[in-house]
Image (cartoon, helix red, strand yellow):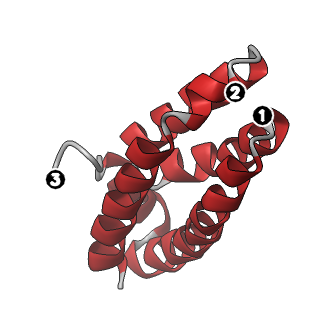
């Protein structure tokens, strides 16, 4: 599990903002990330590369800010595939992406709530 989340980002926020403010900020980011992840099945289900690209683009930065670097990286890979017109290849990563998103969110929830 330690390779799924890098706590360096949150620890940096704690040093810069203080622990209470950093955790409040991180919880807001987590809520945003949870919303974006919830939109993923519909985006992939649409078969529309632009919709998939837009959805994963929205979550990549927030995932990175919370230390979910693998999730952010995979989102960026899927975004690039869609941008290149490789929608079928991007859609083929849906299950892998969903599993990583679920694992990442669970670990973050445990730490932040």
Q: Tell me, yes or no, if residue 39 can be seen here.
A: yes
- Mark 2 secondary-structure assignment: helix
Which residue is tagged 3? 1
Around disc 2, counting alpha carbons within 10 Å, would you say few (fewer than 14), some (14 to 19), or many (20 or more)? many
Vertical comparison of 49 with 63: above or below: above
Residue 29: give x, y in percent of width and height. Answer: 58, 67
Residue displayed at 35% across by 76% down: 109
- Mark 1 secondary-structure assignment: helix
Residue 21: give x, y in percent of width and height. Answer: 50, 77
For the residue pair 71 and 14, the one nearer the viewer reads as 71
- Which quadrant of the view contains residue 108? bottom left
3 or 1: mark nearer the eye = 1
Which residue is tagged 2? 87
In the image, is 29 to the left or to the right of 23? right
In the image, is 41 to the left or to the right of 108? right
- Mark 3 secondary-structure assignment: loop
Residue 47: give x, y in percent of width and height. Answer: 74, 42
Total count of labels: 3
For the residue pair 34 and 16, the one nearer the viewer reads as 34
Q: Tag 1 or tag 3, which sits nearer the N-term?
A: 3
Instruction: Give the quarter of the figure containing the C terminus.
Output: bottom left
Q: Tag 2 or tag 3, which sits nearer the N-term?
A: 3
Image marks 2 and 1: residues in contact by CB distance under 8 Å: yes
Which residue is tagged 1? 49
C-alpha separation, residue under disc 3 versus residue under disc 1: 31 Å
């Amino acid at each position: 599990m330690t390779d799924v989340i890098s706590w360096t980002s949150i620890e940096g926020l704690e040093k810069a903002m203080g622990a209470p403010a950093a955790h409040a900020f991180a919880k807001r980011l987590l809520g945003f990330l949870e919303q974006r992840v919830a939109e993923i099945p519909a985006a992939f289900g649409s078969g529309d590369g632009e919709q998939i690209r837009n959805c994963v683009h929205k979550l990549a930065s927030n995932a990175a800010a919370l230390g979910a670097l693998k999730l952010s990286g995979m989102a960026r890979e899927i975004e690039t595939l869609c941008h290149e017109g490789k929608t079928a290849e991007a859609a083929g990563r849906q299950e892998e992406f969903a599993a990583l998103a679920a694992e990442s969110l669970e670990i973050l929830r445990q730490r932040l709530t």
